[in-house]
Amino acid sequence: MPVKVLIPVPLQRLTKGQETVDGSAGTVITLIKDLDQKYSGLAERICEGDKVRRFVNIYVNEEDIRFMSNEETSVKDGDVVSIVPAIAGGC
Amino acid sequence: MDFTEEQLQRYSRHIILPEVGGKGQKKISGSRVLIAGAGGLGCPVGYYLAAAGVGTIAMVDNDVVELSNLQRQIAHSVRTLGMNKAESAKNTFEALNPDVNVVTIKERLNSKNILGLIKDYDIVVDGTDNFPTRYLINDACVLAGKPLVSGAILRFEGQVTTILPGEGHCYRCLFEEPPPPGLVPSCQEAGVLGVLPGVVGALQAAEVLKLVLGKGKPLSNQLLIYDALGVNFRKVKVPKNPDCKVCGKSPVITELIDIGEEYCSI
Ligand SMILES: [Zn+2]
């Protein structure tokens, strides 16, 4: 069972409309770089270099990686990773 | 205050709930809620809170009603085109429930006026449409110790969280910084499914009523994410950040600041 990655609506254009994609185990940053091979442009939207952008949060099984090991937080098969950008619309 | 026969009928479906009862309905009638933004989110939040009998509702908005609003902003109508949105919402809410006192604040929130405006209210609801105002409202509520029910929408996705200053996380604990201008599109640029603010606004109204009643578990230290396309409701954990700039151990924001105007174009 691979890592399940939940893609937010604004980034689903890059994943051909898919709301969930499969990723490979490792760390958060290797997972993102790996996904970028398949879905070009994804890493740049989420990260600046090797750092996750500060208005994007990443959760491994509901836990915010900022309170674990940040980009080095490990992900294993069966984990669910959520990418959650800040949104501001109220209109 | 005792309820009239008419009020007993109006609120009977509340009063019959053991979690509400006459006592809870009185709490609702005595409560004061400020809603920032009378748009997609502010309309359903205010509409349901007016129906529920919240005693005083302040609607803050300095915009006027436009035709493109009517696809989702259910408190406005073709009859109120061109009218201030807070005023238009007041007409609608008072027609639904004359018990409710709707206060209109036709101003844009800023670092100078916000603390004075929220001070007379028990709970603040964020339904604004830009990052600078969201961070301003968060910081003001943390400094003033006001509970804040925050909702945000874009395209098919919504986010809801309840901020209880002193107890749980704040918006800056959740997202440390607003994105740079231009990186996250606005609803105007990216669109929004008309019913989406209805779903998110109803969730916000439920959070407000729970806080007023002191019942259930608030969405504190959590973020609820709703995805209309996949029909997913997900919750993630939001710990209080010890390094938070406004509610952390050594806060650097001790008075309010206006974030640059350039963000307002988002
Ligand atoms: Zn905080």
Image (cartoon, grey):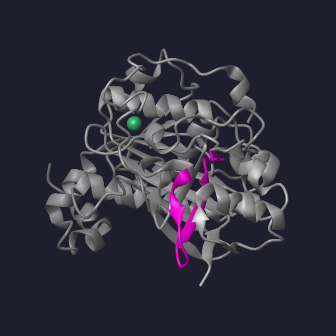
Query: At 48% across and 47% down in the image, what residue appears?
Result: A66
Q: In this view, does B255 lie above or below B25?
A: above
| Residue furthest front as drawn | A26
Viewer-closest of A46 and B134: A46
Residue B71 visible somewhere in the drawing: no
Query: At 56% across and 45% down in the image, what residue appears?
Result: B89
Task: Give the image location of residue B81, x and y in percent.
Answer: 74, 43
The quadrant of the rendering that contains the C terminus of chain B is top right
Query: At 41% across and 52% down in the image, what residue appears?
Result: B238
Viewer-closest of B2 and B67: B67
**Ligand 1 picture quarter:** top left
Viewer-closest of B253 and B249: B249
Q: Is residue B236 above or below residue B115?
A: below
Quarter residue B109 falls in: top right
On the rendered structure, is B39 left or right of B140?
A: right
Q: Give the range drawn in magenta.
A: A72-91
Task: Give the image location of residue A54, x and y in percent.
Answer: 59, 40
Residue B223 visible somewhere in the drawing: yes
**Magenta-span inclusion, residue A73:** yes
On the rendered structure, is A20 left or right of B203?
A: right
**Magenta-span inclusion, residue A39:** no
Task: Give the image location of residue B173, x and y in percent.
Answer: 44, 40
Quarter residue B254 falls in: top left
Q: In this view, does A65 lie above or below B90?
A: below
